[in-house]
Image: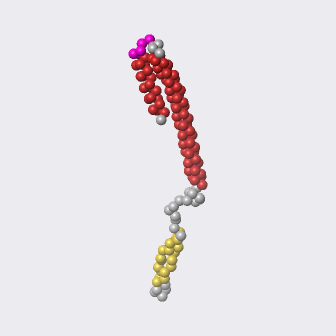
């Protein structure tokens, strides 16, 4: 795109002649394929975006693996607590507990721990 700038000059007869001078207009927008911008820079921008996307993908995978490990540990601990709770309940039902009051207190503590862990799972 070009703009013309009017230039006036006088003629030998005393008249004025309009002579348009064409000047190129430099675009203010930068295009990726513009040789003035440089393909190296465009490639670097693309490479940086791909690297960032890959880094985010790996980070999300690592977070998912860690959460799965923690959930697995919680599930194992809940299973252990279930076994202990069941053992204490049977001891109370059959009256084989050496100290029923302490057994009830311990049973309440274990049930509270189990509920707290089960709450974290969800």
Residue sitting farthest toward the bottom:
13
User: Quick check: 89 above or below 52?
Assistant: above
- Along the horizontal axis of the image, is 8 left or right of 58? left
- The residue depicted at 52 percent of the width and 29 percent of the height is 75
Q: Which residues are magenta?
A: 98-102
Q: Position of residue 71 (x, y in %)?
A: 52, 32
User: Quick check: 82 above or below 9?
Assistant: above
Q: Position of residue 117 (x, y in %)?
A: 46, 29
Q: Position of residue 42 (x, y in %)?
A: 57, 53
Q: How is the image coloured?
A: secondary structure
Q: Position of residue 45 (x, y in %)?
A: 56, 50
- The residue depicted at 48 percent of the width and 81 percent of the height is 18
Viewer can see residue 88: no
Q: Magenta stretch containing residue 2, yes or no?
A: no
- The residue depicted at 48 percent of the width and 22 percent of the height is 85
Residue placed most toward the observer, 122 or 93: 93
User: Quick check: 5 above or below 61?
Assistant: below
Residue placed most toward the observer, 76 or 45: 76
Residue placed most toward the observer, 43 or 89: 89
């Amino acid at each position: 795109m070009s703009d013309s700038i009017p230039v006036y000059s006088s003629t030998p007869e005393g008249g004025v002649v309009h002579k348009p001078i064409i000047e190129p207009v430099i675009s203010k927008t930068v295009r990726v394929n513009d040789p003035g911008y440089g393909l190296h820079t465009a490639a670097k921008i693309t490479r940086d975006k791909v690297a960032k996307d890959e880094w985010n993908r790996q980070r999300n995978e690592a977070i998912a693996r860690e959460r799965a490990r923690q959930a697995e540990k919680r599930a194992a601990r809940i299973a252990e607590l279930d076994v202990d709770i069941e053992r204490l309940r049977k001891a109370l039902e059959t009256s084989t507990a050496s100290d029923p009051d302490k057994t009830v207190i311990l049973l309440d503590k274990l049930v509270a721990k189990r509920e707290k862990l089960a709450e974290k799972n969800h």
